[in-house]
Image (cartoon, rainbow, N blue to C red):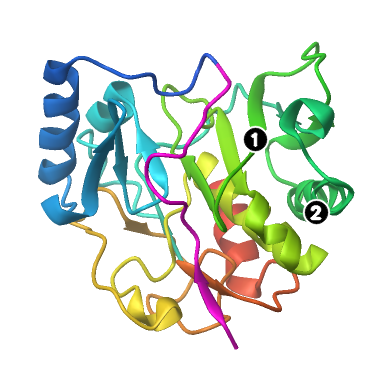
Amino acid sequence: MKTIVLALSIGIFAYGCSSDPSPGSAEEQEEIIDNLVQAGFPANDILVSDGVVYVGRDAAVSLVASREMLEVDSSEEEQYRTNNLVGGNVGTICVEGGELGGFSSKFNDALNGAIDNYNQLGLSFGVQRIDGDGSGCDAIIDGNVVGGTGGSAGFPSGGFPFGAINIGSGLEQFSTGTVEHVITHELGHCVGMRHSDFFDRSISCGSGGNEGDGGVGAIHIPGTPTGASVGGSLMNSCFRSGESGDFTGSDVTALQTLY
């Protein structure tokens, strides 16, 4: 089956929420890059576009998030997660889509399915959809449709999920289940999930190497496989053209362990 990278071409990302990384000074960019290298990410996997630093192809990293990656707690070795997770004070995560995000009928259905994926697990937070009104939300993730095929997001910082997911308009050619897969995947990054095959992207992508570990930015979650396989996780780096959009057993274990 056709394999597609879960990433958009760098340079077309458009974040519409004030909590997203904004272009920083050259000094801030340099510190973020230094922090990422110290955290174990290969320098050739770090990109800067329009003043924003990206790692692993589809994760924007703020200065705060990069600093948190260096705060190692060896007592909490918990598939793979970042050091940055959503705090217990976040009970309701809202995802904004609909007309504001430019979602089509297929994308709307896929977003609803992705939200249901999380709510079926009995996690410490619930996910709900909003279209403009953020009352009752502890955190808001802005859903945007942009050019390209794939998706992008970022990792939590300050105890809050990343504030945006970008979904490529080119996904319209695929099934609702495949679009649901991509949206669920990007929401997974927002709450701290790393790619399940971060150590060897060729497992799901057919080519590619190690995104970087260093024992800091990719912590194994107990009860989940340390290896990876095609179709073994919704958090694989690349997806196939006929995905169901559902979590695998290891995905469920990972999220329920964390939250």
Which of the pair 10/138 is nearer the observer? 10
Q: Is residue 58 above or below residue 3?
A: above
Q: In what quadrant of the picture does the C terminus appear? A: top right
Circle 1 residue: 144
Q: Is residue 143 above or below residue 212?
A: above
Mark 2 residue crowding within 10 angstroms, few (<14) / some (14–19) / many (20+): many
Circle 2 residue: 110
Q: Nearer the viewer, mark 1 or mark 2?
A: 1
At numbered mark 1, what does the secondary structure look like: helix, strand or loop? strand
Residue range (magenta): 1-17
At numbered mark 2, what does the secondary structure look like: helix, strand or loop? helix
Which of the pair 161/240 is nearer the observer? 240
At label 1, which amino acid type do we have?
A: Asn
Q: In what quadrant of the picture does the N terminus appear? A: bottom right
Residue at 45 percent across and 66 percent down: it is 237
Q: Is residue 258 above or below residue 60?
A: below
Question: Does the magenta run of residues contain 11?
Answer: yes
